[in-house]
Image (tube, rainbow, N blue to C red):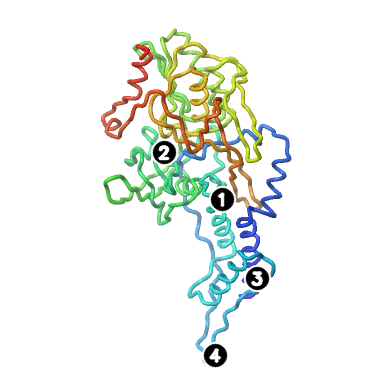
Amino acid sequence: MSDSAGCKVLVTALVVAFIMGGLGFAVGFLTHTVMVADAAPAVSTSVVVVTATQVPAEDSPEPPPTMEQPSPTVEPSAEPVVVPTVEIPPETGAGFDLFWEAWDLIQRDYYGDLPTEEEMTYGAIRGALNTLDDPFTGFIEPRMAEINRADDTGTFEGIGAYVTMRDGRLYIVSTFQGLPAEEAGLQRDDIVLEVGDTPIENMSVYEAISLIRGPAGTSVQLTILRQGQEPFEIEITRASIEIPVVESELREDGLAYVQLLDFSSDASVKLADALEEMLSQDPEGLILDLRANPGGWLNEAVLVSGLFLPEDELVLIERFKDGTQRPYMTPNQPVALDIPMVVLVDGGSASASEIVAGALQDHDRAVLVGEKTFGKGSVQWPHELSNGAELRVTVARWFTPDDRAIHGEGLEPDIAVELTQEDVDADLDPQLDRAVEYLLTGQ
């Protein structure tokens, strides 16, 4: 391909990408949105993955380097070198006239290799998305998107940690016991600055996770910032991760304890089985632990809420940008309707966890103990693009039965108890202790 032809292709790609992004996703994006909006609200459309705050932080290899067109060799000559330029398209609007003016100067004067058409297109899309100020609306390149299409049953390969993106930085929310992230020494609130040699600040959470996830047996190097310390590097060997989903026990004090770690596709069934087994032993109270639970499937959040609330009770309100809203009601017969109950929450309780906690709190079914929840109450619809890339777009927000906003607000516990790193290091759990105290004493 000649330099001139390559520039024309690049210009075409840029025009498409920037018009779609900068003009409110007109043309291609608008067409796709209309198609989605006009479709009947089938389960596959309205019941979507809602994990995007803290997604299971499993991590993937860096994509292979992109092959660039070789730069032409310029032989020494007395004649000035002619740098190919592109003609600025007419009628692009004042804002894009400015863009093309700038790009013309870059082509003319920039000392160095220009990016490929693919790199510029991806960069243009990301630049447009960054103007939305929404970390959950994100673009994922094809290779990363394929890695992210993991089995929703809770099995994947990575380091065994939950993460979230806050203020453009990737934070460790929690690590799985006995898995690589914990064994490598990662701690809650550690900040991941780089994956390999790639800085990840201001990436979408999906892209950052995709860089960390990867096949079992491979290694990934993370640059970590920990409070009070200089940045340091950790190398972690990835493993096959299977989230246990539900862990339960009947305690010696007569209380039933059940931890729900993830809202995967069978979470409500596994939770119901655990509850029925423990309730058959007549416990005095129930503790549902949703700490560090990043969410999962919306329909599982509704089904889990229905295990503790009467049938046809309001669980949440889903509200769209045009003002329309959809209520979600409990569809199933309850399993644990009357037993005194506490729900443990913290800053890692997000998305589907907040739906359940908010519903139980608003209906006075359970007391929330712990720390303020994350505040991720938005819905993303994933769209697979023509080249295998994925675009996740925020389309709605959630509100509790009492019409409290979840997104950006979080849920305040009824009884606030902090869990510090010192507590964790000393194998103490003051939040659980307070939940036990409340159920046994009523105070």
Residue, disc 2? 161
Name the mark nearer the viewer: 3 or 2.
3
For mark 4, give the secondary structure.
loop
Residue, disc 4? 79
Question: Mark 3 or mark 1, which has the lower sequence index?
Answer: 3
Near-viewer residue (351 or 425): 351
**C-alpha separation, residue under disc 2 versus residue under disc 1:** 22 Å
Residue, disc 1? 139
Q: Crowdedness of circle 3 by 10 Å Cα count: few (<14), some, many (20+)?
A: some
Q: Are marks 3 and 1 in contact (CB under 8 Å)?
A: no
Question: Mark 2 or mark 1, which has the lower sequence index?
Answer: 1
Q: Are marks 4 and 1 in contact (CB under 8 Å)?
A: no
**C-alpha separation, residue under disc 4 versus residue under disc 3:** 25 Å
**Residue 49 image position (x, y, % from top left):** 57, 36
Question: Mark 2 or mark 4, which has the lower sequence index?
Answer: 4
Residue, disc 3? 8
